[in-house]
Image (spheres, grey):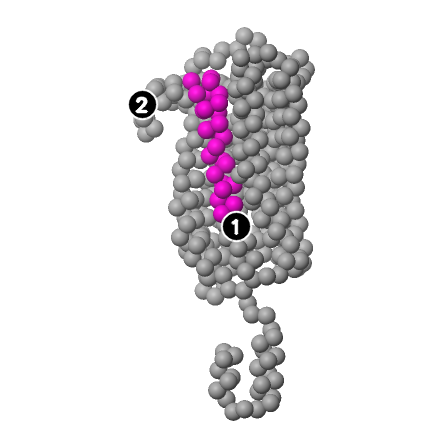
Amino acid sequence: MNPTDLTDTTVDESIYSNYYVYESIPRPCTKDGIKAFRKLFLPPLYALVFLFGLLGNSVVVLVLFKYKRLRSMTDVYLLNLAISDLLFVLSLPFWGYYAADQWVFGLGLCKFISWIYLVGFYSGIFFIMLMSIDRYLAIVHAVFSLRARTFTYGVITSLATWSVAIFASLPGLLSSTCYTERNHTYCRPRFSVNSTTWKVLSSLEINILGLVVPVAVMLFCYSTIIRTLQRCKSEKRSKAVKMVFAVVVLFLGFWAPYNVVIFLETLVELELLQDCTFERQLDYAIQATETLAFVHCCLNPVIYFFLGEKFRKYIVQLFKTCRGPLALCQPCGVLQMYSADTPSSSHTQSTVDHDLHDAL
C-alpha cells in the first residue's frame, strides 16, 4: 500500500501511528536513471574500445612477430602486454550486450568472461609494471642489464606474471554466478556468507594490485630514469623523457579515477557513507571511470606509434606490405619474417627502448 493512500481512510490514532512509523523507515534508493544511462551509453562505448583495442594490439602482435622476432626481454613483455589487452577487449562485446539488455549467455560463459576480464585486467597492469622495471634496468644499470634483460628471463618472468594474474582473478571466477531476479538475469559476483566482507576485500585487492603497487614501482623506476637522463647530454633525451612522462601520466589518468570510486564504493558497503544521492552519483562515476579505464588498453599502441621511431617505421612498413587490413595476400603472412631488426649480439635493443637507449 502506498503511504499517501492512508490519508483517505477514517481518522484513527492507530492508523496515524502506523503511518508515521512507516514513513520513518528509509525508502529504497531507486536507480532507474542509472540503468537507462547504462543501456544508452555503455554498448557503443564498449564497441569502440573493442574495435580500436583489437585493431591496435593486433598490429602490435603482427609487428613483433613479423619484424622483431622476440629477441629481447622487452619484446617479450610487449607481446604479453598486447595479449593481455586483447584478452581484456575480447570480453567487452559480452559486457556491452549485458549493459543493453541482460545476461543471456548462461552460467559457464558468465564465469569464463568474468575470469578472462580479470586476468586481462591484472596481467595488463603487471606487464606495464614489468616494462617499467625493464626500462629502469636498461637505463640506470646498463651493464647489468646486458646479462639480466635476456629472452629467457623475459619468458620466465612473464610466466610468473601470468600465474600471479590468474591467482588474483580466482576469487572473481569462483564468486561470479548467473541468477534471475525480477525477470532480469544478472552475471555478478555473489557471496553466500559475509558478502560485505568479501566485497570490501575484492575492492582492496583491485586498489592494491591495480594501483598502489604499480604506481609505487613506476614512480620509483621513472623518477630514477629521469635523473639518469638529466645527466646525459643527448639530442634525443627530451624524446625519451616524453615517453616516460606519457606512460606514467596516461596510466594514472585512466586508472586512478576508477580506483578512487571503487574505494568510495567500499565505504558505502561498510555503511560509512549513506546517502541516496551520493550513491546515485557514485554509480554514474563508476560507469564513467570504468569506461575511461577500458580505453587505456587502446593507448599502448598509440604511445609506441607516436613516440617510438622504430615501431612507427615497422607499422608503416607493415601496412605498405599488406595494402589493406583485410588483404589475405601472402606477403602479409605472420609467419613470414623480415630481417628488419637483425641483432649484432645476444642482446637486442627492444623496440620501445630504442629512443631511451639513444638518449644515453
Task: From the top left corner, tell me how far across and down residue 336 is, in percent.
Answer: 41, 18
Picture residue at 61% right of the left edge, 31% below the top: 129
Between marks 1 and 2 in the image, the one whose residue lies nearer the viewer: 1
Q: Which residue is mark 1?
A: 285
State the residue at coordinates (48%, 87%): 8
Indicate whether 164 appears above or below 359: below
Q: Residue at x 45, y 31 (%)?
A: 57
Where is residue 192 shown, x and y percent of the image? 63, 59
Asked if 307 appears above or below 47 in the picture, the reply is above
> Can I make out residue 245 in this image?
yes
Left or right: 279 in relation to 198: left
Element type where label 1 sits in the image: helix
SS under mark 2: loop
Which of marks 2 and 1 precedes in the sequence? 1
Q: Are marks 1 and 2 in contact (CB under 8 Å)?
A: no
Return the residue found at the far top: 344
Q: Quadrant of residue 92?
A: top left
Disc 2 target residue: 323
